[in-house]
Amino acid sequence: MRLFRLSLLAPSLAVANCYVWPSPQLDALEALRWDQAGVNTSSGTQVIAGFVEPCGAFVGADNTGRANVADWIRTAYHDMATYNVTDGTGGMDASIRDGFANTLAILEDTGNPLVSIADMLAVGAIMAIESCGGPVVAFRGGRVDTVAPNNPGVPEPQDPLESHIAVFARQNFTQTEMIGLVACGHTFGGVQNAAFPQVVPVLNDPNNTESVSHFDQTFTHFDNNIAMEYISGTTQNPLVVGLNDTTNSDKRIFGSDGNTTMLSFANSADLFASTCASLFTKMLNTVPAGVQLTEVINPLPVKPDYLHFNLGADGESLQFSTQVRLWDLPNPNSTHTVLMLWDDRASNSSSTSTPTSTNNITLVPSKVVTAAGGRFTASWYSSPLLTLDAFRGITNMRFFVDGKLEDQDGVGFAVADDIVWSDMSCVTSDFNSATFAVAVCKSLAPTRVYLETPGQDSISRPISVETDLTLQPVVANATYNIWSVELDGVFNSFTSGAEVDGEKISRGDPRSLSRLEVCA
């Protein structure tokens, strides 16, 4: 399989222009985009990956003639296709969720308030393209889910060429870009009899039970066969050589410039890949007026994750552990020396350029996984469970990787230990009831403390459902107060949050009933 890495994400650029960790929304979007395979994948990415690879798979049944990879790209285009360049309405905003219920059902339980459904649809298309032989596609986050469906915007096969040109112009694509985007999208998939019986007859093929006539012979893999077969006259594309010429829309589109664009694609797989990378990016970044997307989200070269805190029952010890992801290391399957140093409230050594801090620990390798169809690797290293003094805590981390300091250009990796779980959390022996206890720094002075769990609003957009905790009279120690709540029959995973001066802050480390000790 040939993989198109392309200069837009060459090794030196893949870790350039990165944001400073931590940044809750960007952290969530970066994980969605890059933590794609193996351990430590975000819930949304894990679900998407399961419906992308293997590239020939289709949810529900075998031998249907369909493939999930094509559906991810088709869904993204249909969502974008409502865009109107004149008034700025429409675009990638998840308005398609009522019309593409099967695809959206895959995502409905995986969202969170930091990541919109529209962002997940964009990443779904990107993962499908990259995992199945296509080029790396730049991703920006920050799409906003709309409250209501938009007017449909996809042209029909029977529409005349002038109508297609006008529709793509409304979507802000030129005629040449129209040819390219159709060819790029149609390197995957085909036309289904159930949707277009006037285009595809019933095929009566046990290996193609949904009677799908494919656009090219490699319909589950990205390549320029869509152009090569068209130029050579061997294509079986039902929108080019269909018996009803009225519905041969690809034939009219591809030939609208005298076949100049398709000939260039047929002659150069690299040109086809680079053009598709640009056009897919433009398609996915087409959003309603007023929506501000992030900068391109490239993978952080060093990214801590899964920070675990627990205040001991004695109120004096704070347990802490973390994992760190190292992006695209040379020789990733070899063991690298990774040293973690940290500052606490009684020290200030974040400017240290040599590993001299007394607060240090060597991390151990966990697993190496891949991303973007195997182009990049992510090496995960883990710390043991550390027992810290609760008063001193931990405020900042930095790492030495094979002797090289990694501290985000002197900023370090700031750590918040102001809202942590408490060992007073426990579950009854029958696992029907649990006490969730959260320790909060007194200096934070919150007006309320609560548990958070993902949910949906009345129109299926991801939200956070909050459950308030009560301040307990027990004083944990000089640093923390305890807030808690008892819940019956609840098996959700919760994070914790607090409201301080009218602002809400959230902390990670999800905790569920299954992770609690049995109450004494």
Image: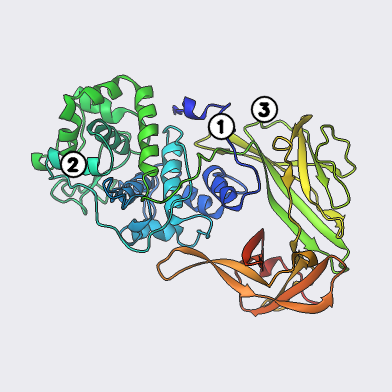
Number of dots carrying numbers: 3
Gap between marks 1 and 2, in whole Å? 37 Å
Task: Report the amino acid beneath label 3.
Answer: Asn
Task: Report the amino acid beneath label 2.
Answer: Ala
Q: Dot 3 lies on which element?
A: loop
Instruction: Please give the label number shown on residue 375.
Output: none
* Residue at the limit of the structure toward the front, as seen here: 501
Instruction: Please give the label number shown on residue 331.
Output: 3
Give the percent coordinates (x, y) of residue 366.
Answer: 71, 43
Sequence-first disc among 1 and 2: 1
Which quadrant does the N terminus fall into? top left
Marks 3, 1: nearer the viewer:
1
**Which is nearer the eye, 132 or 311?**
311
- Mark 3 residue crowding within 10 angstroms, few (<14) / some (14–19) / many (20+): few
Marks 1, 2: nearer the viewer:
2
Which quadrant does the C terminus fall into? bottom right
Give the percent coordinates (x, y) of residue 409.
Answer: 70, 35
Sequence-first disc among 2 and 3: 2
Instruction: Please give the label number shown on residue 166.
Output: 2
Gap between marks 3 and 1, in whole Å? 17 Å
Q: Dot 1 lies on which element?
A: loop
Task: Report the amino acid beneath label 1.
Answer: Ala
Q: Height in image: 122 above or below 134?
A: below
**Which is nearer the eye, 517 or 75?**
75
Contact flag, marks 1 and 2 (Cβ < 8 Å)? no
For residue 78, side relative to residue 244 (left or right): right
Name the residue carrying label 1.
Answer: 14
